[in-house]
Image (cartoon, rainbow, N blue to C red):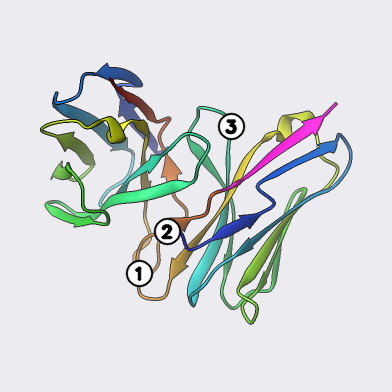
Amino acid sequence: SQTIHQWPATLVQPVGSPLSLECTVEGTSNPNLYWYRQAAGRGLQLLFYSVGIGQISSEVPQNLSASRPQDRQFILSSKKLLLSDSGFYLCAWSLGRTYTGELFFGEGSRLTVL
Amino acid sequence: SQQGEEDPQALSIQEGENATMNCSYKTSINNLQWYRQNSGRGLVHLILIRSNEREKHSGRLRVTLDTSKKSSSLLITASRAADTASYFCATERLGAQKLVFGQGTRLTINP
């Protein structure tokens, strides 16, 4: 069966520090991968998605970046965090080819920037 | 920008009652999906309805889609305390391989 792992689950970082959130998927090949951010009590904002290794599409201009170094690994990074980067970050995968299909989400990473 | 807009933003009902949540969107879509999120957790997929479908059932869930009105509804029948969660609709626009989520409806089931 397929599983998705996301870490760390919680982190508190000072403004200006770097960030690295990692997501890995097991039990499937060539998934579409997604990073979403959720502000407190709000909906999800799509940040990045990837349909293959090295292929990254950015949805929102910001100081975050994403990389996909391996087929089932998706990394969200920042060189210098801002206060506005605080939020709940969710990684997800799907197998859709002609359409997205069902998304499978990780348990999320809660980031607090102080 | 958010494609789907859920209504109401919050809903509180008694256990055993039916809960109805609505979603409106703006552009033509491939499909519309509903997800559930327990507090502080990831989202869980509930149901997908394609643009050429009008109604779909899954257990106590019933989803309708009206593409002429660009709207969908999620009905949860015979609600239980465990149904307390936030519910989100998500749409996939034509030609786009990504989902855009609404702001969600916070559903509270009172025992």
Q: Share a chain, discs 2 and 1?
A: yes
Q: Which mark is residue B96?
A: 1
| Three-letter code for the amino acid on which mark 2 is drawn | Leu
Expressed as whole percent of the image width and height from the top left, the position of residue A75 reads: 20, 37
Expressed as whole percent of the image width and height from the top left, the position of residue A40 reads: 47, 34
| Three-letter code for the amino acid on which mark 3 is drawn | Asn
Q: In this view, does A49 lie to the left or right of A19?
A: right
SS for callout 1:
loop
| Disc 3 + disc 2, Cβ < 8 Å | no
Callout count: 3
Q: Which chain carries label 3?
A: B
Alpha carbon separation for disc pair 1 and 3:
28 Å
User: Crowding near pointer 2: few (<14 within 10 Å), some, many (20+)?
Assistant: many
User: Crowding near pointer 1: few (<14 within 10 Å), some, many (20+)?
Assistant: some
Rendered position, B94 above or below A96: below
**Which comes before the other along the chain, label 1 or label 3?**
3
Comparing A6 with A78, the one in front is A78
- The residue tagged 3 is B38
- Taking the spot 30% from the left edge, 21% from the top edge, the residue there is A8
Q: Quick one: which residue is furthest to the bottom in this view?
A: B68
Q: Choose top left, top right, bottom left or bottom right for residue B79.
A: top right
Alpha carbon separation for disc pair 2 and 1:
8 Å
- The residue tagged 2 is B99
Q: Which chain carries label 1?
A: B
| Three-letter code for the amino acid on which mark 1 is drawn | Ala
Q: Share a chain, discs 1 and 3?
A: yes
